[in-house]
């Protein structure tokens, strides 16, 4: 019998809420690559388990509201450190067979991967879509509002 | 190219509402103390951050980081103004 993993259980840290609709936009800082996603997925794996089982995951934020802290505008501003962002919809991630776990504080989600192998990570990279310029990156330096 | 003090995913926030990463991800763990101002992130995206606390977790010490507004270059310009004689 294997020893329990020395990791924190994520289940109590999941929010009890309805899944976001397919049209909701997901924000993921970029640019992403298989190697970068693997690094992040492994950090989640090293910290957490889900129902006692290994978990690989990547953090995203969902634009759940039209205004306020969970709006697309606020999220892009919040993640202004990212020169580019990936903006798939929930539907695109679900169609690629990824679960979105409503983890920690709204509107944070963990995209769950089945493992950290190239096929899973490549599928996620494809589902994230192409990187797009973050309009808030560098704004302060340029003196714009 | 920016050298980060502690590698993390700037989108990895936990129940604290802060960015988290393992202390073992620090280039020099002695720099990572509560209140320290550090460069956090990776070669693709990095930011100035304040170390909030270090908590013991089952998988090892975890650092919480408060990402400060603005880009690293903004802080560089600030320091340059501050130390340049008027």
Image (cartoon, helix red, strand yellow):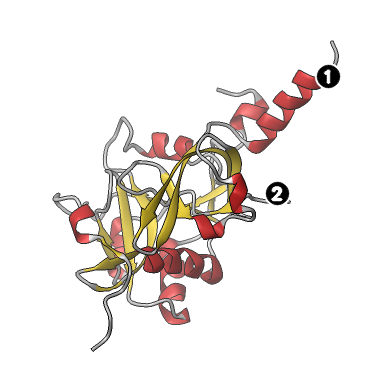
Residue for badge 2: B2
- Which of the 4 image quadrants contains residue A139? top right
Tag 1 subunit: B
Along the viewing direction, whichever of A85 and A1 lies nearer the viewer: A1
Along the viewing direction, whichever of A134 and B49 lies nearer the viewer: B49
Q: Looking at the image, how many numbered discs can be counted on the residues?
A: 2
Within 10 angstroms of label 1, few (less than 14), some, or many (20 or more) residues? few
In the displayed orientation, state which residue is furthest to the top.
B86
* Residue A52 x/y as whole percent: 22, 72
User: Contact, CB < 8 Å: mark 2 with mark 1?
Assistant: no
* Residue A3 x/y as whole percent: 28, 81
Within 10 angstroms of label 2, few (less than 14), some, or many (20 or more) residues? some
Seen at 61% across and 45% down, the residue is B31
Seen at 55% across and 49% down, the residue is A84
Query: What's the CA distance linking mark 2 and mark 1?
Result: 23 Å
Q: Quadrant of the N terminus of chain A?
A: bottom left
Seen at 34% across and 49% down, the residue is B14
Q: Quadrant of the C terminus of chain A?
A: top right
* Residue B6 x/y as whole percent: 58, 52
Q: Earlier in the sequence, mark 2 or mark 1?
A: 2
Tag 2 subunit: B
In the displayed orientation, state which residue is furthest to the bottom.
A1
SS under mark 1: loop
Left or right for A63, reference B69: left
* Residue A11 x/y as whole percent: 20, 60
State the mark number for residue B84: 1
């Amino acid at each position: 019998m294997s020893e329990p993993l020395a990791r924190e259980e994520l289940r109590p840290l999941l929010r009890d809420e309805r899944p976001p609709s397919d049209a909701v936009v997901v924000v993921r800082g970029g640019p992403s690559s298989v190697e970068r996603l693997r690094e992040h997925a492994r950090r989640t794996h090293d910290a957490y388990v889900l129902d006692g089982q290994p978990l690989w995951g990547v953090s995203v934020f969902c634009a759940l509201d039209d205004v306020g802290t969970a709006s697309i505008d606020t999220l892009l501003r919040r993640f202004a450190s990212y020169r580019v962002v990936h903006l798939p919809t929930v539907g695109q991630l679900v169609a690629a067979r990824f679960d979105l776990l409503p983890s920690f504080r709204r509107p944070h989600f963990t995209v769950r991967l089945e493992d950290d192998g190239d096929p899973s990570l490549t599928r996620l990279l494809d589902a994230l879509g192409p990187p797009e310029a973050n309009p808030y990156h560098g704004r302060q330096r340029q003196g714009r509002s | 190219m920016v050298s980060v003090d502690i590698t993390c995913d700037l989108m990895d926030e936990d129940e604290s509402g802060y960015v988290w990463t393992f202390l073992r991800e620090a280039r020099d763990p002695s720099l990572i103390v509560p209140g320290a101002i550090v460069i956090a992130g990776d070669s693709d995206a990095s930011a100035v951050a304040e170390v909030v606390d270090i908590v013991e977790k089952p998988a090892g010490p975890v650092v919480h980081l408060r990402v400060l507004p603005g880009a690293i270059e903004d802080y560089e310009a600030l320091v340059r103004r501050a130390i340049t004689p008027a």
